[in-house]
Amino acid sequence: MKTTNKQRMALFEKGNTVGNRFTSENQPKKNGRKPSLYKQLKSITGKKVDYELSKEDYFKTIRFLMERTKDELNSIMKDEQTPIWVCNIISAIFSDIRYGRTSTVEMIFDRLFGKSTQPIEGDVNANVSGSVGMVDLSKLTTEELVQYNQLLDKINGKKV
């Protein structure tokens, strides 16, 4: 595969003088970091953009919304002063109701209370050999167990 001139310019080679090098005179037009989203919003709106609610306030608000009736949620939704994120949650709840889903409620509960634990039950003394058809050998006598082991050895190709 042949490399192009542009690809060669991107590679650092000792003594390479091809291309524009950064110097005190040759600097990018927009130097430094990009402004944060908050600074960009401040320049657009002319207002100070800062956090107004803490994480706990968000959780309390979501919890409050989850305990309201449909009529109460409708009136909150119609209020012009309601923050858009609250309207978004209410809209998602109504959408779930309309289509018979519970995904929004589950997501909100996971946020508020943490994901539910799913206990795994099992016998500590269980044989974990990977065999699918395990047989309960507890009812066999010692002689029958010896015969069973001899049969297994014969099946698996071991010398008896």
Image (tube, grey):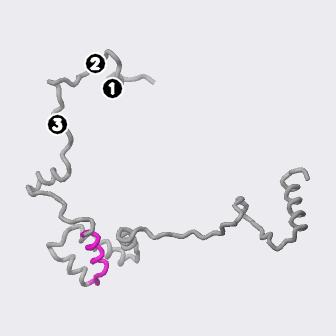
Q: Mark 1: give few (<14), some (14-19) or many (20+) Cα within 10 Å.
A: few
The spot of residue 12 in percent (x, y) is: 34, 23
Q: Which residue is mark 3?
A: 30
Q: Mark 2: give few (<14), some (14-19) or many (20+) Cα within 10 Å.
A: few
Q: Which residue is mark 1?
A: 10
The spot of residue 101 in percent (x, y) is: 40, 74
At label 1, which amino acid type do we have?
Ala
Mark with earlier residue (1, 2)? 1
Q: Is residue 7 left or right of residue 134?
A: left
The spot of residue 122 in percent (x, y) is: 63, 69
Q: Which residues are magenta?
A: 57-70
Q: Is residue 22 left or right of residue 121?
A: left
Q: Residue visible at 29% across and 73% down?
A: 62
Viewer-nearest residue: 92 or 12:
12
Q: Residue visible at 36% across and 68% down?
A: 111
From the image, give the main secondary structure of the stretch colored magenta: helix
As drawn, 151 above or below 159: below
Image label count: 3
As drawn, 9 above or below 73: above
Q: Assess whether residue 63 is covered by the magenta stretch.
A: yes
Q: Mark 3: give few (<14), some (14-19) or many (20+) Cα within 10 Å.
A: few
Which one is in front in this view, the residue at disc 3 or the one at disc 2?
Answer: 3
Q: Quadrant of residue 17?
A: top left
Q: Which residue is mark 2?
A: 18
| Alpha carbon distance from label 1 to label 3 | 21 Å
Q: Is residue 116 left or right of residue 124?
A: left
As drawn, 53 above or below 19: below
Q: Secondary structure at mark 3?
A: loop
